[in-house]
Image (cartoon, helix red, strand yellow):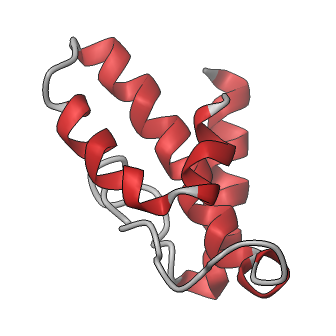
Amino acid sequence: MALIPLLLRNPQCGNDVMEIVETLPRKLALDLKIFYMAAVYPQRYWKTNLGFYIDTTTALPDAYSTEMELPSAEERFGKPGLYYLADAFLEF
């Protein structure tokens, strides 16, 4: 879960995550994708507030919403995706 604030603070690490996902076994790759998307959605949703504290000009790419059948990170500033991911995580 520490990956979420790391990605929010250093969005350039998002590309590293996408490379690492390709090398992991399926279950671990899914876990990493979930935590990655758990950073993508709040980055969009809290962009203004985060902007007071960190650089928000570099957005994490919405790399997995389509593949994971999640709402787009651009839809209503990521709010639907954040809620959907939270519900799915409770079942996870």
The one nearer the camera, 8 or 72, is 8
Above or below, comparing residue 50 to residue 7 in the picture: below
Horizontal placement of 16 versus 82: left or right? left
Q: Please state the horizontal and vertical placement of residue 39, each as a whole percent of the image.
A: 59, 53
Res. 73 visible in picture: yes
Res. 64 visible in picture: no
Q: Please state the horizontal and vertical placement of residue 15, each as a whole percent of the image.
A: 27, 53
> Which quadrant is the C terminus positioned in?
top right
Horizontal placement of 28 versus 80: left or right? left
Above or below, comparing residue 33 to residue 67 in the picture: above
Q: Please state the horizontal and vertical placement of residue 65, each as a whole percent of the image.
A: 38, 58
Query: Exactly how many numbered labels are in the figure?
Result: 0
Q: Please state the horizontal and vertical placement of residue 58, each as a whole percent of the image.
A: 46, 78
Q: Which residue is drawn at the image coordinates 62% and 37% (left, top)?
A: 88
Horizontal placement of 53 versus 78: left or right? right
Q: Which residue is drawn at the image coordinates 63% and 78% (left, top)?
A: 55
The one nearer the camera, 34 or 87, is 34
> Which quadrant is the N terminus positioned in?
top right
The one nearer the camera, 82 or 12, is 12
Q: Which residue is drawn at the image coordinates 73% and 56% (left, top)?
A: 83
User: Residue 8 appears in which quarter of the rendering?
Assistant: bottom right
Above or below, comparing residue 69 to residue 31 in the picture: below
User: Residue 63 appears in which quarter of the rendering?
Assistant: bottom left
Residue farthest to the left, as pictured: 23
User: Residue 12 appears in which quarter of the rendering?
Assistant: bottom left
